Amino acid sequence: MTDASLAAAPSPDLPAMPRFDAILYPHRSLPPLGFALLMTAVVAVSAGVGAGFVLIGAWPVTGFFGLDVLLLFLAFRWNYRQARRAELIRLDQDGLSVRRIEPDGRQCEWRFEPYWVRVGFDDPPRYDSELTLSSHGAHLVLGAFLTVAERLEVARALRAALRAHRDD
């Protein structure tokens, strides 16, 4: 045996690479810097218009401008909190596992036998098509926060990985 063949032999101690490994998370198009700039602009406009109302004697209106800014800030905070949601899908020699991480940090995990699990998705997809995993009467909805095109892409990739896993 040559040194090259020894180096190329797989080590029994190393885990095998997964056939499918995906992390699904909601898309957020406004980065933190954009959020800071947007809120600065909203506060500046609200303060300017509110000051104008104070000058004409309608000072109670200024409080409503502050309330609008507060509600907008809270809506963005809720939106960014929802962005912490994630779903980790992994298909390896041990089976198919799905781990869901909620915005508050709670985690749930499901395991499926790859030979029995079915990936469900409407073909052609509709606007309300769900990506589901089904096995033995149980159903799990995946990627509800993804667009239809993204769910279709995940469904196709997962079906191909499961098919390859079953053929081995």
Image: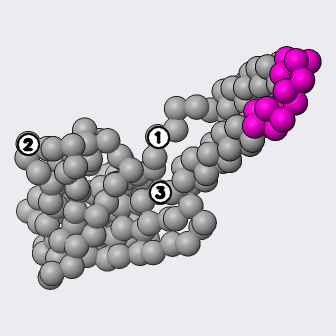
First-in-chain label (1 vs 2): 1
Direction from residue 98 to residue 64 in the image, left or right: right
Depth check, front residue: 27 or 93: 27
Depth check, front residue: 157 or 36: 36
* x and y, in percent, of residue 1 in the image: 30, 56
Is 85 contained in the magenta span?
no
Residue 6 is drawn in which quadrant? bottom left
**Position above or below: 131 against 134:** above
Q: Secondary structure at mark 3?
A: strand
Asked whether the viewer can see residue 102, the reply is: yes
Residue bearing mark 1: 27
Q: Which mark is residue 86?
A: 3
- Identity of the residue drawn at 77% across and 25% down: 46
Q: Quadrant of the C terminus?
A: bottom left
Residue bearing mark 2: 124
**Residues rendered magenta in the picture:** 51-66
Farthest residue, direction bottom:
136
**Position above or below: 153 against 50:** below
How crowded pointer 1 is (Cα within 10 Å; few <14, some 14-19, many 20+) is rated as: few
Q: Which secondary structure is most common in the magenta stretch?
A: helix
First-in-chain label (1 vs 3): 1
- Identity of the residue drawn at 8% across and 42% down: 124
- Identity of the residue drawn at 41% across and 60% down: 88
First-in-chain label (2 vs 3): 3
